[in-house]
Image (cartoon, helix red, strand yellow):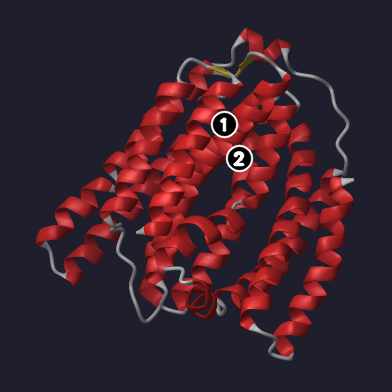
Amino acid sequence: MLNKFFLGVVFIGFPLSVIGSLFHFSNVLMFGVYCITIIGLASIMGRATESLTIVAGPRIGGLLNATFGNAVELIISIFALKAGLIGVVLASLTGSVIGNLLLVGGLSFFIGGLKFKRQTFNVYDARHNSGLLMFAVIVAFVIPEIFSQNMNEAKTISLSVGISIIMITLYLAALFFKLVTHRGVYQSKETEENIEEEIPEWTKTKAIIILGISTIAVAYTSERLVHTFQAVGEKFGWTELFIGVIIVAIVGNAAEHASAVLMAYKDKMDVAVEIAVGSTLQICMFVAPILVIASLFFQINMPLVFTIPEVVAMVTSVLLTIVIANDGESNWFEGATLLAAYLIMGIGFYLL
């Protein structure tokens, strides 16, 4: 029923997006249409990646969910960079980090915990990801913030580009470690026992084709969405920071939001956690560095320097997630704790 609803949203929303942009409908109206259309497209992408997950396994499946979920975020951010909205891009990266860890992770733990009193996931993966999260946010994001205080703009950009290259290299090395050299080495017996045979909704070829078409549709819709930010901000009194941290981050990451919660409800916590944490790592170690490098080809370059509230919010999200998830177990109360932290930060960014 829900799948049919999102499919209907796309069949109505996408043509309306095209018509609205051609005939210059109200920016506020089209902002809502674009957001709903992107969420609908993200849902279809989530169904396609779920089919691929069944074929490829939880780790690669989680990576696929994170990748195609972040493709939406990357596309929106590139168009925002082109429009010179550096603040929105940095804020959306912050929103993706806290959104994936606190909102997606929290919803997954909470919804799954309502159905199952105790859920487990691979504790070795959790500990491995903890180290990467510490590096990606606390090292790679805090260091530029501190060092840039005594640097001019040119040196700050050079520092950001250097850090970006290192982060991309380490991210690729992490994938090679998990998927090639140490594939299955840290898989627990409990995880192996929980593997169930399932039939994918779509074939591999069909899923890939749908992903490709959906990505193109998302690219068009995202480009139009970016042009409505200024009008919407003036209408509702929203700052660039709030639009980026809350609105763009939620819309851009809707695919993994839906997929992770669905997997948790099905007691597939390995996939749910891989989506939430894996998506965060990909945002920090691949999407953000790519955007820094891509900005070199635009009129305004983007440094890897966030505001103090953004840095504090991301660091807090990482530390809280590590404390809660490092034991390889989850329940609804832990999910509620993560959600409460997200709401507190959301209120703060709204009032800032």
| SS type, badge 2 | helix
Looking at the rendered image, the quarter that the N terminus falls into is top right
Is disc 2 in contact with disc 1, using a CB cutoff of under 8 Å? yes
Q: Residue 188 at x, y = what percent?
A: 59, 12
Q: Which residue is mark 2?
A: 63
Question: Left or right of 9: which side holds 146?
Answer: left
Q: Examine the image and state in which quarter residue 270 appears.
A: top right
Q: Residue 240 at x, y = what percent?
A: 42, 68
Task: Give the answer, above or below, for where 17 lies relative to 102.
Answer: below
Q: Examine the image and state in which quarter residue 276 appears.
A: top right
Q: Residue 274 at x, y = what percent?
A: 58, 33
| Residue at (43% x, 58% y) in the render | 350
Q: Which residue is mark 1?
A: 179
Amino acid residing under circle 1? Leu
State which tag comes first along the sequence, 2 or 1: 2
| Residue at (30% x, 60% y) in the render | 161
Amino acid residing under circle 2? Leu
Task: Give the answer, above or below, for where 246 lies relative to 80.
Answer: above
Question: Left or right of 224: which side holds 99?
Answer: left
Nearer to us of marks 2 and 1 is 2
Task: Give the answer, above or below, for where 271 lies relative to 80.
Answer: above
- Is residue 188 or residue 271 the one in the foreground? 271
- Is residue 192 or residue 277 the one in the foreground? 277
The answer to whether one can see residue 278 in this image is no
| SS type, badge 1 | helix
- Is residue 232 or residue 68 the one in the foreground? 232
Q: Residue 306 at x, y = what percent?
A: 30, 57
The residue carrying pointer 2 sits among few (fewer than 14), some (14 to 19) or many (20 or more) residues within 10 Å by Cα, namely many
